[in-house]
Amino acid sequence: MNRSVVFVLSSRYPTEKAYGVTTSLTVEELRSRGQKVDVWVPNFDTPDPEHNPGKILISKRNQLFIRFLNKFSESAGFKLQILLCLLGTVKSSRGKQDQITFWVREPYLCIGLFLFTRRIPIIFEMHFPLKNFTRHLILLGLRRQRILIGALTDTHLESLELETNLEGTFILPMAAPNLFFEVGKNREQKIKAKPVVGYIGKATSSGNDNGLLTFLSSIKLAQDREIKVEFWFVGIEELYNVKLRQTARELGILDSYLKISGHINHKLVPEILAKFDFGLMPYKESGYNRYRFPIKSVEYAAAGLPILATNTASHQQILNPSIAVFYDQVDPHDFVRKLDDLLANEERILNLRKSAADWASNFTYYNRVKQASKAVRNLEKTEH
Protein backbone atom coordinates (compact mmCIF):
# COMPACT_ATOMS: atom_id res chain seq x y z
CA MET A 1 0.00 0.00 0.00
CA ASN A 2 1.31 3.46 -0.85
CA ARG A 3 -0.74 5.12 1.88
CA SER A 4 -0.41 4.83 5.64
CA VAL A 5 -3.11 2.61 7.16
CA VAL A 6 -5.09 4.18 10.00
CA PHE A 7 -7.19 1.82 12.13
CA VAL A 8 -10.06 3.84 13.62
CA LEU A 9 -11.55 2.02 16.61
CA SER A 10 -14.81 2.86 18.35
CA SER A 11 -13.94 0.82 21.46
CA ARG A 12 -11.28 0.97 24.15
CA TYR A 13 -7.81 -0.20 23.13
CA PRO A 14 -5.93 -2.36 23.88
CA THR A 15 -8.44 -5.00 24.92
CA GLU A 16 -8.54 -8.76 25.30
CA LYS A 17 -11.74 -8.97 23.24
CA ALA A 18 -11.45 -10.60 19.82
CA TYR A 19 -11.83 -7.18 18.15
CA GLY A 20 -8.85 -5.74 20.02
CA VAL A 21 -6.69 -8.83 19.64
CA THR A 22 -7.39 -9.10 15.91
CA THR A 23 -6.63 -5.41 15.43
CA SER A 24 -3.36 -5.63 17.37
CA LEU A 25 -2.14 -8.65 15.43
CA THR A 26 -3.20 -7.21 12.07
CA VAL A 27 -1.27 -4.02 12.90
CA GLU A 28 1.74 -6.11 13.91
CA GLU A 29 1.66 -8.07 10.64
CA LEU A 30 1.31 -4.91 8.53
CA ARG A 31 4.29 -3.32 10.28
CA SER A 32 6.38 -6.45 9.78
CA ARG A 33 5.82 -5.96 6.04
CA GLY A 34 7.14 -2.39 6.21
CA GLN A 35 3.69 -0.78 6.13
CA LYS A 36 3.23 2.44 8.09
CA VAL A 37 0.29 2.02 10.48
CA ASP A 38 -1.49 4.14 13.08
CA VAL A 39 -4.26 3.25 15.53
CA TRP A 40 -6.73 6.00 16.48
CA VAL A 41 -8.87 5.19 19.50
CA PRO A 42 -11.53 6.78 21.75
CA ASN A 43 -9.42 6.26 24.88
CA PHE A 44 -6.38 4.40 26.11
CA ASP A 45 -6.67 3.36 29.73
CA THR A 46 -3.62 1.14 30.13
CA PRO A 47 -0.10 2.35 29.30
CA ASP A 48 1.29 -0.25 26.90
CA PRO A 49 4.26 0.67 24.66
CA GLU A 50 3.59 -2.36 22.44
CA HIS A 51 0.12 -1.09 21.51
CA ASN A 52 0.69 2.64 21.83
CA PRO A 53 -2.00 4.38 19.75
CA GLY A 54 -1.18 7.15 17.33
CA LYS A 55 -4.05 9.36 18.45
CA ILE A 56 -6.65 9.65 21.22
CA LEU A 57 -9.89 10.82 19.60
CA ILE A 58 -11.94 11.75 22.67
CA SER A 59 -10.86 14.26 25.32
CA LYS A 60 -10.70 13.18 28.97
CA ARG A 61 -13.61 15.49 29.78
CA ASN A 62 -15.80 13.83 27.13
CA GLN A 63 -14.64 10.38 28.24
CA LEU A 64 -15.91 11.18 31.73
CA PHE A 65 -19.23 12.38 30.29
CA ILE A 66 -19.61 9.13 28.30
CA ARG A 67 -18.98 7.09 31.46
CA PHE A 68 -21.62 9.12 33.27
CA LEU A 69 -24.10 8.61 30.40
CA ASN A 70 -23.39 4.85 30.36
CA LYS A 71 -24.81 4.61 33.89
CA PHE A 72 -28.21 5.53 32.46
CA SER A 73 -27.95 4.05 28.94
CA GLU A 74 -25.00 2.11 27.56
CA SER A 75 -26.56 2.33 24.10
CA ALA A 76 -26.68 6.13 24.22
CA GLY A 77 -23.16 6.27 25.62
CA PHE A 78 -21.78 4.08 22.86
CA LYS A 79 -23.55 6.09 20.14
CA LEU A 80 -22.09 9.29 21.52
CA GLN A 81 -18.68 7.64 21.60
CA ILE A 82 -18.97 6.71 17.91
CA LEU A 83 -20.04 10.27 17.05
CA LEU A 84 -17.10 11.79 18.93
CA CYS A 85 -14.72 9.28 17.31
CA LEU A 86 -16.05 10.36 13.91
CA LEU A 87 -15.60 14.08 14.68
CA GLY A 88 -12.09 13.48 15.99
CA THR A 89 -11.13 11.41 12.96
CA VAL A 90 -12.50 13.92 10.46
CA LYS A 91 -10.58 16.72 12.18
CA SER A 92 -7.34 14.72 12.41
CA SER A 93 -7.47 13.60 8.78
CA ARG A 94 -7.66 17.07 7.24
CA GLY A 95 -4.97 17.60 4.62
CA LYS A 96 -4.12 13.87 4.53
CA GLN A 97 -6.34 12.87 1.61
CA ASP A 98 -3.45 11.38 -0.37
CA GLN A 99 -1.58 9.97 2.61
CA ILE A 100 -3.87 7.58 4.52
CA THR A 101 -6.33 4.70 4.19
CA PHE A 102 -8.90 4.16 6.95
CA TRP A 103 -9.59 0.66 8.31
CA VAL A 104 -12.81 0.45 10.37
CA ARG A 105 -15.25 -2.14 11.64
CA GLU A 106 -18.11 0.02 12.95
CA PRO A 107 -20.61 0.58 10.06
CA TYR A 108 -21.85 4.00 11.25
CA LEU A 109 -18.28 5.19 11.59
CA CYS A 110 -17.61 3.91 8.07
CA ILE A 111 -20.59 5.85 6.69
CA GLY A 112 -19.59 9.02 8.55
CA LEU A 113 -16.04 8.88 7.18
CA PHE A 114 -17.41 8.31 3.68
CA LEU A 115 -19.72 11.33 3.94
CA PHE A 116 -17.45 13.77 5.78
CA THR A 117 -13.97 13.06 4.39
CA ARG A 118 -12.77 13.35 0.80
CA ARG A 119 -10.64 11.01 -1.34
CA ILE A 120 -9.60 8.81 1.60
CA PRO A 121 -10.17 5.08 0.88
CA ILE A 122 -11.91 3.07 3.60
CA ILE A 123 -11.50 -0.64 4.32
CA PHE A 124 -14.74 -1.69 6.00
CA GLU A 125 -14.39 -4.95 7.94
CA MET A 126 -17.92 -6.39 7.87
CA HIS A 127 -18.75 -8.98 10.54
CA PHE A 128 -22.56 -8.95 10.47
CA PRO A 129 -25.25 -8.13 7.87
CA LEU A 130 -26.09 -4.47 7.49
CA LYS A 131 -29.49 -2.86 7.92
CA ASN A 132 -31.08 -1.58 4.72
CA PHE A 133 -30.28 2.14 5.06
CA THR A 134 -26.73 1.41 6.26
CA ARG A 135 -26.23 -1.14 3.50
CA HIS A 136 -27.33 1.28 0.77
CA LEU A 137 -24.93 3.99 1.95
CA ILE A 138 -21.97 1.62 2.22
CA LEU A 139 -22.75 0.19 -1.23
CA LEU A 140 -22.81 3.77 -2.52
CA GLY A 141 -19.30 4.17 -1.14
CA LEU A 142 -18.35 0.90 -2.83
CA ARG A 143 -19.66 2.13 -6.20
CA ARG A 144 -17.88 5.45 -5.75
CA GLN A 145 -14.65 3.48 -5.18
CA ARG A 146 -14.20 4.94 -1.71
CA ILE A 147 -15.15 1.91 0.38
CA LEU A 148 -13.66 -1.58 0.16
CA ILE A 149 -15.73 -4.29 1.87
CA GLY A 150 -13.82 -7.11 3.53
CA ALA A 151 -16.32 -9.72 4.75
CA LEU A 152 -15.72 -12.77 6.94
CA THR A 153 -17.45 -15.28 4.67
CA ASP A 154 -19.32 -15.62 1.37
CA THR A 155 -22.57 -15.54 3.38
CA HIS A 156 -21.71 -12.05 4.59
CA LEU A 157 -21.08 -10.90 1.03
CA GLU A 158 -24.35 -12.49 -0.11
CA SER A 159 -26.20 -10.51 2.55
CA LEU A 160 -25.23 -7.33 0.67
CA GLU A 161 -27.64 -8.43 -2.09
CA LEU A 162 -25.37 -7.09 -4.82
CA GLU A 163 -27.23 -6.87 -8.11
CA THR A 164 -23.97 -6.96 -10.06
CA ASN A 165 -20.51 -8.28 -9.32
CA LEU A 166 -19.03 -5.04 -8.03
CA GLU A 167 -15.29 -4.65 -7.59
CA GLY A 168 -14.01 -3.83 -4.15
CA THR A 169 -15.44 -6.72 -2.14
CA PHE A 170 -13.19 -9.46 -0.81
CA ILE A 171 -13.04 -12.14 1.89
CA LEU A 172 -11.23 -10.99 5.04
CA PRO A 173 -11.35 -13.99 7.39
CA MET A 174 -10.33 -14.37 11.01
CA ALA A 175 -6.81 -15.57 11.75
CA ALA A 176 -4.59 -17.26 14.33
CA PRO A 177 -1.14 -16.02 15.43
CA ASN A 178 1.94 -18.09 14.59
CA LEU A 179 2.31 -19.27 18.21
CA PHE A 180 -0.91 -21.28 17.88
CA PHE A 181 0.50 -23.18 14.90
CA GLU A 182 3.60 -24.03 16.95
CA VAL A 183 1.32 -25.67 19.53
CA GLY A 184 -0.18 -27.84 16.79
CA LYS A 185 3.24 -28.84 15.44
CA ASN A 186 4.51 -29.81 18.90
CA ARG A 187 1.42 -31.77 19.94
CA GLU A 188 2.14 -35.38 20.93
CA GLN A 189 0.66 -38.01 18.64
CA LYS A 190 -0.38 -40.26 21.50
CA ILE A 191 -3.94 -39.76 22.78
CA LYS A 192 -4.06 -39.17 26.54
CA ALA A 193 -5.79 -41.71 28.77
CA LYS A 194 -8.12 -38.94 29.96
CA PRO A 195 -8.41 -36.31 27.22
CA VAL A 196 -9.55 -32.73 27.90
CA VAL A 197 -12.53 -31.22 26.09
CA GLY A 198 -11.87 -27.51 26.40
CA TYR A 199 -13.75 -24.28 25.77
CA ILE A 200 -11.97 -20.94 25.82
CA GLY A 201 -13.89 -17.67 25.78
CA LYS A 202 -16.76 -15.88 27.48
CA ALA A 203 -20.10 -17.41 28.48
CA THR A 204 -21.79 -14.59 26.55
CA SER A 205 -20.85 -12.60 23.44
CA SER A 206 -22.41 -9.17 22.83
CA GLY A 207 -25.17 -10.14 25.24
CA ASN A 208 -25.84 -13.49 23.50
CA ASP A 209 -25.69 -16.78 25.40
CA ASN A 210 -22.88 -19.05 24.19
CA GLY A 211 -24.64 -22.25 25.31
CA LEU A 212 -22.43 -23.32 28.22
CA LEU A 213 -25.21 -23.58 30.81
CA THR A 214 -27.24 -25.84 28.49
CA PHE A 215 -24.13 -27.89 27.72
CA LEU A 216 -23.82 -28.90 31.38
CA SER A 217 -26.53 -31.52 30.73
CA SER A 218 -24.19 -33.26 28.28
CA ILE A 219 -21.37 -33.17 30.82
CA LYS A 220 -23.63 -34.79 33.42
CA LEU A 221 -24.58 -37.57 30.98
CA ALA A 222 -20.92 -38.16 30.07
CA GLN A 223 -20.09 -38.41 33.78
CA ASP A 224 -22.96 -40.86 34.40
CA ARG A 225 -21.71 -43.05 31.54
CA GLU A 226 -18.21 -42.90 33.08
CA ILE A 227 -16.62 -41.66 29.87
CA LYS A 228 -12.93 -41.09 30.56
CA VAL A 229 -12.67 -37.40 29.75
CA GLU A 230 -12.36 -34.04 31.49
CA PHE A 231 -14.08 -30.75 30.66
CA TRP A 232 -12.45 -27.37 31.12
CA PHE A 233 -14.05 -23.95 30.56
CA VAL A 234 -11.47 -21.12 30.43
CA GLY A 235 -12.03 -17.36 30.34
CA ILE A 236 -15.46 -17.30 31.96
CA GLU A 237 -16.62 -13.93 33.29
CA GLU A 238 -17.18 -13.74 37.05
CA LEU A 239 -21.00 -13.71 37.05
CA TYR A 240 -21.28 -16.77 34.81
CA ASN A 241 -18.46 -18.49 36.62
CA VAL A 242 -20.71 -18.49 39.70
CA LYS A 243 -23.79 -19.55 37.68
CA LEU A 244 -22.00 -22.43 36.00
CA ARG A 245 -20.52 -23.73 39.26
CA GLN A 246 -23.89 -23.52 41.01
CA THR A 247 -25.74 -25.30 38.20
CA ALA A 248 -23.03 -27.95 37.95
CA ARG A 249 -23.36 -28.68 41.69
CA GLU A 250 -27.14 -28.92 41.36
CA LEU A 251 -26.72 -31.46 38.55
CA GLY A 252 -24.22 -33.46 40.59
CA ILE A 253 -21.23 -32.81 38.30
CA LEU A 254 -17.97 -33.49 40.13
CA ASP A 255 -15.27 -30.82 40.35
CA SER A 256 -12.82 -33.39 39.02
CA TYR A 257 -14.95 -33.78 35.89
CA LEU A 258 -15.48 -30.08 35.14
CA LYS A 259 -12.95 -27.32 35.73
CA ILE A 260 -13.94 -23.64 35.33
CA SER A 261 -11.35 -20.86 35.09
CA GLY A 262 -11.71 -17.10 34.84
CA HIS A 263 -10.21 -14.56 32.45
CA ILE A 264 -6.71 -15.09 31.07
CA ASN A 265 -4.49 -12.85 28.96
CA HIS A 266 -4.63 -13.72 25.26
CA LYS A 267 -0.86 -14.30 25.28
CA LEU A 268 -1.47 -17.33 27.53
CA VAL A 269 -4.09 -18.91 25.25
CA PRO A 270 -1.59 -21.08 23.27
CA GLU A 271 -0.34 -22.51 26.58
CA ILE A 272 -3.91 -23.42 27.56
CA LEU A 273 -4.74 -24.93 24.16
CA ALA A 274 -1.67 -27.16 24.47
CA LYS A 275 -3.45 -28.79 27.44
CA PHE A 276 -6.69 -29.33 25.50
CA ASP A 277 -7.33 -32.38 23.32
CA PHE A 278 -10.58 -31.18 21.74
CA GLY A 279 -12.01 -27.71 21.22
CA LEU A 280 -15.67 -27.10 22.07
CA MET A 281 -18.05 -24.75 20.19
CA PRO A 282 -21.48 -25.09 21.90
CA TYR A 283 -23.22 -22.09 20.29
CA LYS A 284 -26.95 -22.30 19.63
CA GLU A 285 -28.80 -21.52 16.40
CA SER A 286 -29.72 -17.82 16.49
CA GLY A 287 -29.78 -14.71 14.35
CA TYR A 288 -26.56 -13.54 16.00
CA ASN A 289 -24.75 -16.86 15.61
CA ARG A 290 -25.92 -17.36 12.03
CA TYR A 291 -23.35 -14.90 10.71
CA ARG A 292 -20.70 -15.47 13.33
CA PHE A 293 -17.16 -16.60 12.58
CA PRO A 294 -15.70 -17.37 16.04
CA ILE A 295 -11.97 -16.69 16.16
CA LYS A 296 -11.66 -19.69 18.49
CA SER A 297 -12.49 -22.05 15.60
CA VAL A 298 -9.28 -21.01 13.83
CA GLU A 299 -7.26 -20.98 17.05
CA TYR A 300 -8.46 -24.49 18.00
CA ALA A 301 -7.62 -25.84 14.55
CA ALA A 302 -4.20 -24.13 14.40
CA ALA A 303 -3.36 -25.76 17.76
CA GLY A 304 -4.19 -29.16 16.25
CA LEU A 305 -7.48 -29.63 18.07
CA PRO A 306 -10.40 -31.54 16.55
CA ILE A 307 -13.51 -29.40 17.04
CA LEU A 308 -16.72 -30.55 18.72
CA ALA A 309 -19.38 -28.17 17.38
CA THR A 310 -23.13 -27.83 17.45
CA ASN A 311 -24.75 -28.53 14.09
CA THR A 312 -25.75 -24.91 13.42
CA ALA A 313 -25.90 -23.56 9.89
CA SER A 314 -22.94 -21.23 10.46
CA HIS A 315 -20.75 -23.98 11.94
CA GLN A 316 -21.48 -26.26 9.01
CA GLN A 317 -20.60 -23.48 6.60
CA ILE A 318 -17.33 -22.51 8.30
CA LEU A 319 -16.18 -25.98 9.34
CA ASN A 320 -16.43 -29.40 7.68
CA PRO A 321 -16.50 -33.06 8.84
CA SER A 322 -12.78 -33.48 8.18
CA ILE A 323 -11.96 -31.15 11.09
CA ALA A 324 -15.11 -31.16 13.22
CA VAL A 325 -17.62 -33.52 14.79
CA PHE A 326 -21.09 -31.96 14.68
CA TYR A 327 -23.64 -32.80 17.36
CA ASP A 328 -27.32 -31.97 17.84
CA GLN A 329 -27.53 -28.75 19.83
CA VAL A 330 -30.86 -29.70 21.47
CA ASP A 331 -30.05 -33.34 22.31
CA PRO A 332 -27.45 -33.77 25.10
CA HIS A 333 -27.39 -37.54 24.43
CA ASP A 334 -26.16 -36.94 20.86
CA PHE A 335 -23.01 -35.18 22.06
CA VAL A 336 -22.22 -37.99 24.50
CA ARG A 337 -22.74 -40.72 21.86
CA LYS A 338 -20.50 -38.96 19.36
CA LEU A 339 -17.81 -38.21 21.92
CA ASP A 340 -17.82 -41.84 23.08
CA ASP A 341 -17.51 -43.09 19.48
CA LEU A 342 -14.70 -40.63 18.78
CA LEU A 343 -12.67 -41.61 21.84
CA ALA A 344 -12.88 -45.24 20.72
CA ASN A 345 -11.32 -44.38 17.34
CA GLU A 346 -7.76 -43.09 17.84
CA GLU A 347 -7.00 -43.10 14.12
CA ARG A 348 -9.94 -40.77 13.46
CA ILE A 349 -8.77 -38.37 16.17
CA LEU A 350 -5.30 -38.18 14.61
CA ASN A 351 -6.80 -37.60 11.15
CA LEU A 352 -9.01 -34.82 12.53
CA ARG A 353 -5.96 -33.20 14.11
CA LYS A 354 -4.00 -33.19 10.87
CA SER A 355 -6.93 -31.92 8.81
CA ALA A 356 -7.62 -29.17 11.36
CA ALA A 357 -4.03 -27.92 11.18
CA ASP A 358 -4.10 -28.03 7.35
CA TRP A 359 -7.38 -26.09 7.27
CA ALA A 360 -6.10 -23.47 9.71
CA SER A 361 -3.00 -22.82 7.57
CA ASN A 362 -5.23 -20.67 5.34
CA PHE A 363 -6.16 -18.43 8.28
CA THR A 364 -2.96 -16.58 9.12
CA TYR A 365 -2.44 -12.87 9.71
CA TYR A 366 -0.09 -12.90 6.72
CA ASN A 367 -2.95 -14.03 4.47
CA ARG A 368 -5.38 -11.62 6.14
CA VAL A 369 -3.13 -8.65 5.44
CA LYS A 370 -2.31 -9.95 1.97
CA GLN A 371 -6.01 -9.92 0.98
CA ALA A 372 -6.52 -6.38 2.26
CA SER A 373 -3.34 -5.11 0.61
CA LYS A 374 -4.37 -6.62 -2.72
CA ALA A 375 -7.79 -4.91 -2.54
CA VAL A 376 -6.20 -1.53 -1.76
CA ARG A 377 -3.65 -1.87 -4.58
CA ASN A 378 -6.48 -2.60 -7.03
CA LEU A 379 -8.29 0.53 -5.81
CA GLU A 380 -5.13 2.64 -6.12
CA LYS A 381 -4.75 1.53 -9.73
CA THR A 382 -8.20 2.91 -10.57
CA GLU A 383 -7.23 6.28 -9.07
CA HIS A 384 -4.45 6.81 -11.61
Image (cartoon, rainbow, N blue to C red):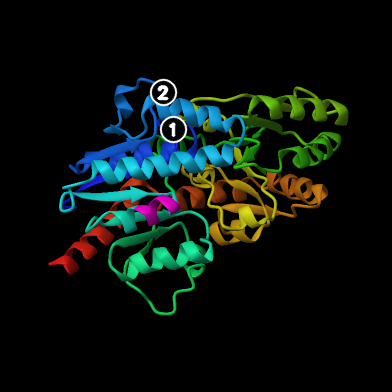
Taking the spot 57% from the left edge, 41% from the top edge, the residue there is 75
Viewer-nearest residue: 57 or 333: 57
Viewer-nearest residue: 199 or 6: 6
Total numbered circles: 2
Task: Provide the secondary structure element on which disc 2 rests.
Answer: loop
Residue 320: give x, y in percent of width and height: 57, 59
Residue 305 quadrant: top right
Taking the spot 56% from the left edge, 29% from the top edge, the residue there is 275
**Segment colored magenta:** 108-112
Q: Is residue 366 above or below residue 232?
A: below
Magenta-highlighted stretch: main secondary structure? helix
Instruction: Say whether residue 173 is visible.
Output: no
Taking the spot 49% from the left edge, 73% from the top edge, the residue there is 161
Which quarter of the rendering shows the C terminus?
Answer: bottom left
Q: Amino acid at mark 1?
A: Arg
The residue at which mark 1 appears reads as 12
**In the image, 114: left or right of 212?**
left
How would you rate the neighbour count of disc 2 (Cα within 10 Å): few for under 14, some for 14-19, many for 20 or more? few
**Numbered tag placed on residue 45 in the rendering:** 2
How would you rate the neighbour count of disc 1 (Cα within 10 Å): few for under 14, some for 14-19, many for 20 or more? some
Earlier-in-chain disc, 1 versus 2? 1
30 drawn magenta: no
- C-alpha distance separating marks 1 and 2: 8 Å
Q: Are discs 1 and 2 less than 8 Å apart at CB?
A: yes
